[in-house]
Amino acid sequence: MKLSTKIIHSGLGGDQKPTGSVITPIFQTSTYVQKSPGKNLGYEYSRSANPTRKALEKNISSIENARYGFCFGSGMAAIDGILRLLRPGDEIICSNDIYGGTFRLFNQIYAKQQYKFIFSDLQSTVELEKLHNKRTKMIWIETPSNPMMNIIDIKMVTDFTKKKKILTVVDNTFASPFLQNPIDYGADIVTHSATKYLGGHSDVVLGSAVTNKKKIADELYLIQKSCGAIPGPMDCFLTLRGIKTLHIRMERHCYNAKKIAEFLTNHKMIEKVFWPGLKSHPNHKIAKKQMRDFGGMISFKLKKNSLSLAKKFLSNLKLFTLAESLGGVESLISHPSSMTHASLSDDLKEKNNITDSLIRISVGIENHEDLINDLSKSFNKLK
Ligand SMILES: Cc1ncc(COP(=O)(O)O)c(C=O)c1O
């Protein structure tokens, strides 16, 4: 063989034999050998299927108690994939406190194409009955919600959607499958920004959608391979690796969040703490019913509604990193009004209680006393 042929073929075969590797390899390949036209080993092209992605899809569906799973290039791509199950003219009832990016996708992209979104706090069947009409095809919920940590009773919603023969979709990003499995409460589709707790290390952007229903799974697969918003094998590998410690990380996230929520509740500069584990949380009982613990996300409001005070507080911190995103091992802090929810209109921010004094914490897995010290010092500097 001449050099150019050796460069391409030496040491490599199109038909990789299993090696006994303990960890799923990164199958960094776009295409797969065919023994004869149409005869392959189960894979033909990586947009349709890739072994690293398949391992991750099996893993996420399994920990969500679902039969079918699909991964996408981001949480937003997963949400977009799910919305493609619907048609222009369809209506979606949606919880009003959702991630700003989801709101933007619904209101600025899909609403332009005659999809209609009706936002509400979804706290009772009476309210659902009022909002429902013959064009309603889906109820979309985030629980706990972003950034106000509202809790929606998943079973209450799925009892309603079953009666009406429409879909329930739950964005389970904030809880993670360790704390809550919406499929067990009758949800049709569960979606994640795996960028957050599933990946867990702030080093990957990825999304997923799982379901127990074959018909929905077939449609999601068609959407995934036709629209092509898939994650690469390296990102699937990183997410698989992250998930291996999900249960251990979540225990510590919840423990630290409890300590921090208690500290914040007793602090005189704070007006209100939003964490579903607090007895004072309006949906504490529902959270207790459907979650195994209360999660690592906390929001709180300073007594004084001042943007400059909030900014000062944030810039004083040393251990909490000011950044969007959540669910990583390190503690992150953000200002929803100017960061994650900046795309909301002022009216909507006001309606959803997203004021200048609102601060959101993604509690990491560091030592809780060090974290509390950091917060405490920053408060002291405001005096
Ligand atoms: C609850 C929730 N859903 C979906 C998303 C979107 O996920 P991604 O950033 O992976 O596209 C986010 C991102 O912050 C989120 O917080």
Image: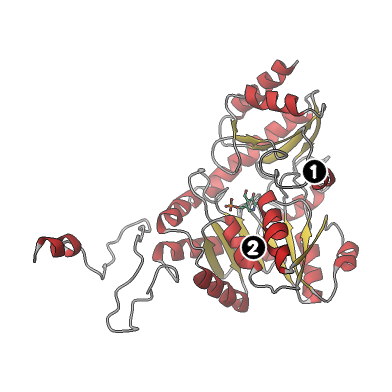
Q: Residue type at mark 1: give it.
A: Asp
Residue behind label 2 places its C-beta within 8 angstroms of ligand 1: no
Can you say whether 326 is above or below 301 in the image?
below
Q: What residue is disc 2 on?
A: 190
Label for residue 220? none
Residue 245 rendering spot, x and y as whole percentages: 50, 47
| Cβ–Cβ under 8 Å for marks 1 and 2 | no
Q: Please indicate whether residue 119 sits to the left or right of residue 362 in the image.
A: right
Residue 11 falls in which quadrant of the image? bottom left
182 is higher (above) or lower (below) than 267: below
Q: Is residue 92 left or right of residue 14?
A: right
State whether residue 378 is above or below residue 204.
Answer: above
Does residue 355 appear to the left or right of 372 in the view shown? right
Badge 2, how many Cα within 10 Å: few under 14, some, many 20+? Answer: many
Q: Please identify the quadrant where the C terminus is shown.
A: top right
* Kind of element beneath mark 1: helix
In front: 113, or 146?
A: 113
List the residue tagged with mark 1.
346
Residue 81, image x, y percentages: 60, 66
Residue drawn at (65%, 72%) of the image: 85
Give coordinates of residue 90: x percent, y percent.
Answer: 75, 72
Left or right of 11 in this view: 161? right
User: Quick one: which residue is furthest to the left in this view?
Assistant: 1
Query: Rounded to the nearest whole Å, what is the CA distance between mark 1 and mark 2?
Result: 30 Å
- Residue 300's image quarter? top right
